[in-house]
Image: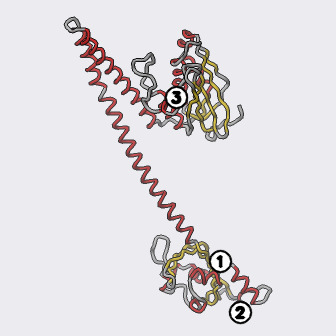
Amino acid sequence: MKQIIDNTFLFAGSAERISTLINSLKVGVLLQGPQTEILFSNKAALSMLGLTEDELSGMSSFHPDWNVIHEDGSSFPAETHPVSIAIHTRKPVANIIMGVYRPVTKDRVWLLVNAEPLLDDKGRVKEVICSFSDITERKAVEEKLNWLYQSLEIRAFELATSNADLERFLYVATHDLQEPLRMVNSFTQLLKKKYSKQLDEQANEYIDYAVEGATRMKKLILDLLEYSKFSTNNEELVPTDMNIVLRDVSLKFFKELKESGAELIIPVLPVITAIKSLMVQLFENLIGNALKYHSDSKPVVQIECKVDGENYLFSVSDNGIGVDPKYADKIFILFRRLHGNSEMYEGTGVGLAICKKIVELHRGNIWVESEQGKGSKFYFTISAKQNPVYEKL
C-alpha cells in the first residue's frame, strides 16, 4: 500500500506521514485502478461503506452487493458511475449523489461523490482518486422538508378550494336572500297600511318589529357581502400618500365635523406601499366610530404615525365613551356589537372586522387600548419593509 501511495502522491514527506494525513480526513478517499478496482481506502471511506480494508481491497465500484441507485430510486448503470466517466473522459467528475447499500450493516448511505483521473505521460488513466462525503442526514432532512412542502401545497390547495366555495356561497346567499327580505318588508308595511285601523296596538307593534327585523337583516347581508369582498381583492400595493388618504377621508366627514364641532388632528404622514382604497376605508371606519361613539364633550380625534422597528405604527385616538378592556379583542370579531339593538348606536358590528381584515392584508396587526368613559386609542401596523419610503418621522 505504501508503494502505491509513494508512486501516486508526488509531494515531499514519508509514506507514513501521507497515510496519516489521508486517514485524518473526514472525507472518504479511494484510489482505484483503470478497471475501477480499489487499490487503497482511508479510514473515513471504510467507515462510510461499512467494510474492512481487506473486504474492500480489489472490489470494483460496480459490485452488485452495493446496489447503487439514483435519488429517484432507479439503478445506477456502470457507465454512469463517476469513476467510470472519469476513466473514459479523462476529466474530473464532481458532486454526483449516489445511494449505496451496505451489505454488512444492511442499510443505505447517501454519498456525494467526486472522481479525479490521474494520467501518465502519454495521457492515459493510471488511477482515479474517488472522494466522497456522507450526506445521509442531509438527505433525510431534505426529504422531510419536501414532504412538508408537498403537505403545505396540498393544504393550500384545499384552503383555496374551500375559500372559493365559501365565496360562492356568500355571493349566492347575500344576493338571493335580499329579494325575499324585500318582499317581507314590503308586504308587512302594506299589511300595516291597509289593516292598521282594524288591528289593535299590540298587533301594530308586532308589525313594526317585523319591519325592523327585516331591515336589520338586509343590513347584515349587505355588510357580509362587503366583508367577503376582501377575500378576492386583487388590487396591487402601490406607493400611497397617506396625507392624500386622510384629506379624502376628512372631506367625507366634513358635515359631521362641522355639525358636532369635532376636531380632527392630522400630522404630516408618510408615503407607504398599500392599497389606497383600503386605506381610505380603514380610516373611514376608525374615524367614523370615533365620531359615532362620542361623549358629551366636544369630540377630538387625533391621528399619529411613527416608525416602530420594521413597521409604521399608526394610531387613531378619541375622547369618546371608550370600551371595557375585557372586550378589547372581541370588538374585532365579525358582527360582534357591544351595544344592543335598542340602544342609540346603529350598525351591525362589521366595521372593525373589516379594519382587521384590511390591516392583515397589509401584513400588519391592529389592537385597541381603551377604558370606559375615557376614550379609545386604536393602533395598527403596516410593514415598512415593503415600502419604498422608510425614514424616521
Q: Which residue sits furthest left?
A: 198
Q: In this view, does 192 lie above or below 2?
A: above
Q: Mark 3 points at which residue?
A: 277
Q: Which amino acid does label 2 sit on?
A: Lys
Q: Nearer the N terminus, badge 1 or badge 3?
A: 1
Q: Nearer the N terminus, badge 2 or badge 1?
A: 2
**Residue 338, how many percent across, how many down?**
46, 25
State how far apart marks 2 and 1 are (Cα). 20 Å
Total marks in image? 3
- Number of the label disc, if any, that sits on residue 27: 1
Q: For the residue labelled by badge 3, is the local secondary structure a helix, a strand or a loop?
A: helix
**Residue 126, how many percent across, how many down?**
65, 88
Occupied quadrant, residue 209: top left
Q: Nearer the viewer, residue 275 or 378?
A: 378
- Point out the frontmost of discs 1 and 3: 1
Is label 2 in contact with label 3 (beta carbons under 8 Å)?
A: no
- Its colouring scheme is secondary structure
Give the side of residue 340 with respect to residue 62, left or right: left
**Residue 74, how many percent across, how many down?**
45, 74
Q: Which residue sits furthest top?
A: 197
Give the side of residue 371 with respect to residue 126, left or right: left
Q: Is residue 78 above or below residue 381?
A: below
Q: Which amino acid does label 1 sit on?
A: Val
Q: For the residue labelled by badge 1, is the local secondary structure a helix, a strand or a loop?
A: loop
Q: Nearer the viewer, residue 193 or 123?
A: 193
Q: For the residue labelled by badge 2, is the local secondary structure a helix, a strand or a loop?
A: helix
Residue 290: tell me if it is visible.
Answer: yes
The residue shown at (76%, 86%) is 17
Q: Nearer the viewer, residue 116 or 192?
A: 192
Occupied quadrant, residue 4: bottom right
Q: Mark 2 points at which residue?
A: 2
